[in-house]
Amino acid sequence: MGELRVYEDRQGQAAAPRRQPPKPPTDEPSEEVLADRLFGDAAATEELAAKGQSQRRGKRVRQVGEKEDNGQNATEDGPRHPKVSAAWHDPDDADDGGALLADTPANTPASVSLTAPARRRKLRRVPQETHVSKRQFVERLAERYRALYGVPEWAQRLTDAAVKDSSVVPPEHTTAPRADDAHTPDSPSSRPPLPSRQLRIRRLTDANAAAPSAAVVRSLEFHPGAGHLLFTAGLDKRLRLFHIGDDGESASADAFHGNRCLHTACFADLPVWSAHFLGPPRSPYDQRVVLAGRRRYFYEYDLGAMQALKVRTLESLRHELSFERFIASPAMPLMAFYGDNGQVVLVSAASKQVVGMVRVGGGAGAACDLRAAAFSPDGRVLACAGRTGGYVYLYDIRAGRGSASESPGTLTPAPLARLADEGSLQCTALAWSPCGRVLATGSDSGVVNLYPMEKGQVDTRSALHYQRAVMNLTTRIDHLSFTPDTQALVYASGAKRNALRVLHTTTGHTFANWPTQQTPLQRVSAAAVSPGGGYMAVGNDRGRALLYRLEHYAPM
C-alpha cells in the first residue's frame, strides 16, 4: 500500500486524505549494500586498520644525528622513491642573458650571429656587423619590442615604483657598464659617416595605404619619441594616426608588413593646413596634436583620451582672419602662429593663452609679411623670415620676462642677429639641425643655404656667411628636414612635380641615384624624417604618404 498524506485546504480544514501512488519496483541495491561495496564490511575495515598500525610500528625511526636518506635508503616496509630531476628551469635564474643563457652547453659559442637566420638582420646597427654578445642580443630584442609596441603599462608602473623606492633594486645587483656596451647606436657621434656618392634607400608600402587621404596631405609628422607612429592631416578634415609596421626584412613571405591605421578623427569645420605634435618627448604634451586651418580658431587633439578641444583664444584677442600656419617648439610647451604685418604670436600650450609677440623687421616701416619660422632644438632661439629683403631674424625667446606658463604678455623676445640670406630675395623655408649648429634656409628661387650657428657667431656685429649652397631646384623651397645626425638634408618644392632632393651636408653633394624618373613623388606637399633617421615620409597632392627606408640608419 502506498503512503497516505493529509493536506490542509485554504480555510485551514483538513482535506480528504490523498493516497500516494505506489512506487514502481526497482532492481537498485539498498543503501547498506552500496556502503559494503564501497567501504567493505566492518570486519574487513578493522583488519586493515590493525595491519597498518603494525606496519607503522615496524618502521625504523630516524634518530637525532642520523643523515637523511631522501628516500634512497627506504625501509623494507616503506616504498623506495627514486630521485626526480627538475622538469623545468626558470630562465630568470640565469646569471646573465636571460633565457638565451639558460642551459647553454659549454661548447656553445659566446656570440650570436646576426646574419642567420635572415630575420636577425634587422637587429644590426651597421651592415658590417655579423656577431654580437648574448647580452647585447637580448638587449636589442628588447629594444626592438619597445620600438614596435612601446613599453607595456605594467612594466611602466614597475619602473616608476622602482625609481620612487630605491630599495627595490639592492646595490649589490647593480653592475658596472661593460666594454662591449660602450657603443651607443642611437647617439649621432657613434654612427658611421654617411656615404656621399650613393644613397641607400628603398621604397616601402605607403604609410597611409590602409586609409588614404581624399585630398592633399598638408601635414605629416613622426612622433618625437616613437618613430613607429606617424600622423597625416590634410584638406579632407581628417587626422589619421598610423603605426609603421615591419620594414619587410623578414624571410617569411606570408607575413603582413602593412602599416595599420590606429585612429581617425574628423574635424567637420576645419580643413587642416598645419598640424604638429606638442612638447618634447616624454612630456605631458607629447600625445597632443594641434591642428590649424583657415579659421580664427584651432583644435588640440589628445591621442590618448581621443578628445578634441576647440580653442578660441586668438579669435577674441587678435584681428587676423585666419591662423592656418604655426610651428611648435621642440623643447617647450610653446607655439608660434603666423600673424599679419610680420607678427609672430606666441601661445602657451599649457594655458592656451597669448604669452608674447615678435614683430619681424623691427619698426613699423620695416615690418613685412612672415613667410617662415623655426625654433632651435633647445627652444631658446626663434628664426623668422619675411617676404621682402631676403633677411633672416634671430630672437632670444628666454631673454624676456617670465615664462610660457605664466600670465599673458610675459614673453618679450630680444633680437639676436639679422643675417642676409645670400642669393635670395625671399626666404620661404627655415630649419634647424637637431644639434643646433646648422641653420638651413630655402628661397623662392630654389637656393638652399646652410649657415653655421656655433656659439659666439650669432652676433649682430659679425656677418654670417653660408657654409654650403645648393642650386639643384629652380622653384621655391617649401620643405626642409634634417636627419637626426645632421649628415643629410631633405629639401623639396611643391611648385613642380618630383621636386625633392637629398643633400649630403658634409660634402655639399646632392645624391644623384635618387630620386629617379620612375619615383612617384608627384607634387610634394609635406616631408618628414623619423627621429631615428630610418624612415622618410613624403606627402603629395594625391593624398598619399609615401614611405621610404633609409638603410644607413636604424629602423626606428
Image: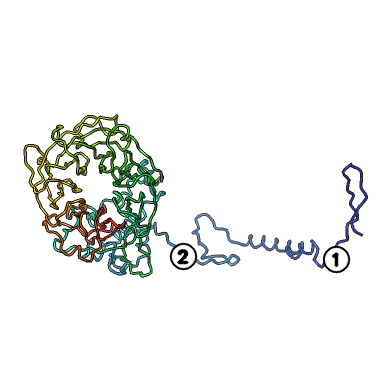
Q: Quadrant of the N terminus?
A: bottom right
Residue 25 disc label: 1
Given the image, on which type of amino acid does mark 2 rest?
Answer: Ser
Q: Position of residue 124 (x, y in %)?
A: 26, 62
In the rendered structure, the answer to whether residue 309 lies left or right of residue 48 reads left
Residue at the limit of the structure toward the front, as seen here:
321
In the rendered structure, the answer to whether residue 103 lies left or right of residue 19 reads left
Residue at the limit of the structure toward the left, as seen here:
462
Question: Does residue 534 sit above or below 361 in this rendering?
Answer: below
Residue at image location 91% in from the left, 43% down from the top = 13
Quadrant housing residue 502: bottom left
Q: Quadrant of the C terminus?
A: bottom left
Q: Nearer the viewer, residue 296 or 167?
A: 296
Q: Earlier in the sequence, mark 1 or mark 2?
A: 1
Residue at image location 73% in from the left, 64% down from the top = 38
Q: How is the image coloured?
A: rainbow
Q: Secondary structure at mark 2?
A: loop
Q: Secondary structure at mark 1?
A: loop
Q: Which residue is mark 2?
A: 85
Q: Nearer the viewer, residue 32 or 294?
A: 294
Q: Position of residue 386 (x, y in %)?
A: 16, 41
